[in-house]
């Protein structure tokens, strides 16, 4: 079974909308032409990775654990210093684009400013399915420890923070919290599911 033409058009529109935002915001925050090119290439790479996963079986969505590990590998983050755990979860195609970008931005920040700027830093990424107020939520937590957050905080609120604080709530109805604590950055995301158009599922094939 393949995607319908209308579903393909919807996913294509979403991809190009995200690309436009990436191109525009990468230019806004770049310090030079070379910096702009590097940031843009890295962000498009994150979108390409998740898009390739989606193309294998568009109706099935993207496996969240695979998405997380792919981004950690792309950032050359040492597996021995990471803990990744959570129940089987699949993310709908268009929802996977902003989520993959958020993971990319967090990974870059961890390498440049946070846990992986120092040899002893570690990272834990966990997610769970919770039910609250009659709705199901996917709760994802990014927790850095022994990081360099105090020593070298990000210089300004850039694309990554805008993505987490604005784009995820707008696109996915997510609730997000960001804290730069002494041990390291902690980011919490809660993404709702509903019967009409779930952004994620408990490992089952996603209806479209």
Image (tube, rainbow, N blue to C red):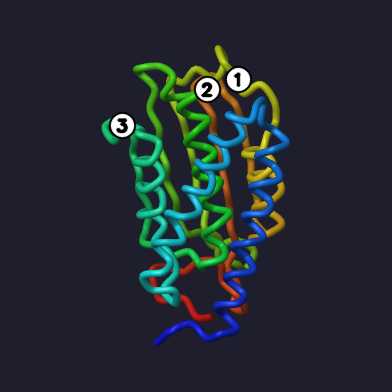
Give the mark nearest the N terminus, 1 or 3.
Answer: 3
Quadrant position of residue 135: bottom right
Quadrant of the rendering where the N terminus is positioned: bottom left
Nearest the camera: 85 or 163? 163
Q: Position of residue 126 (x, y in %)?
A: 42, 46
Q: Considering the numbered disc 2 on the image, is that residue within a helix, a strand or a loop?
A: loop
Provide the secondary structure element on which disc 1 rests: loop
Residue drawn at the location 34% of the way across and 35% of the way down = 82
What residue did someone put label 1 on? 153
Count residues near mark 2 (Cα–Cα under 10 Å), then give few for <14, some for 14-19, many for 20+.
Answer: many
Whichever of labels 2 and 1 marks the residue nearer the N terminus, that label is 2
Q: Where is residue 15 in the image (x, y as percent from the top left)?
A: 59, 62
Q: Which residue is drawn at 58% across and 29% down?
A: 34
Measure how far apart labels 2 and 1 are at the Cα level.
Answer: 6 Å
CA separation in Å, label 3 and label 2 = 16 Å
Task: Residue under label 3, please give it.
Answer: 78
Q: Which residue is at the far top?
A: 151
**Label 1 neighbour load within 10 Å: few <14, some 14-19, many 20+:** some
Residue highlighted by disc 2: 113
Q: In which quarter of the image is residue 52?
A: bottom left
Is 56 on the left or on the right of 7, as rendered?
left
Residues at discs 2 and 1 in contact (Cβ within 8 Å): yes
Q: SS of the residue at dot 3?
A: loop
């Amino acid at each position: 079974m393949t995607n319908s033409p209308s579903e393909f058009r919807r996913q294509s529109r979403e991809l190009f909308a995200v690309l436009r935002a990436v191109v525009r915001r990468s230019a806004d925050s770049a310090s030079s032409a070379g910096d702009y090119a590097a940031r843009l290439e890295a962000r498009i790479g994150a979108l390409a990775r998740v898009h390739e996963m989606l193309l294998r079986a568009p109706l099935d969505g993207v496996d969240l654990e695979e998405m997380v590990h792919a981004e950690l590998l792309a950032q050359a983050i040492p597996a021995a210093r990471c803990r990744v755990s959570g129940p089987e979860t699949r993310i709908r195609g268009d929802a996977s684009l902003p989520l993959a970008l958020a993971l990319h931005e967090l990974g870059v920040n961890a390498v440049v400013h946070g846990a992986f700027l120092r040899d002893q830093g570690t990272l834990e990424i966990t997610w769970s399915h919770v039910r609250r107020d009659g709705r199901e939520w996917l709760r994802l937590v990014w927790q850095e420890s022994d990081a360099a957050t105090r020593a070298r905080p990000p210089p300004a609120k850039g694309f990554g923070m805008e993505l987490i604080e604005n784009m995820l709530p707008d696109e996915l109805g997510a609730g997000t919290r960001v804290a730069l604590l002494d041990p390291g950055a902690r980011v919490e995301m809660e993404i709702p599911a509903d019967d009409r158009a779930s952004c994620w599922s408990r490992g089952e094939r996603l209806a479209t």
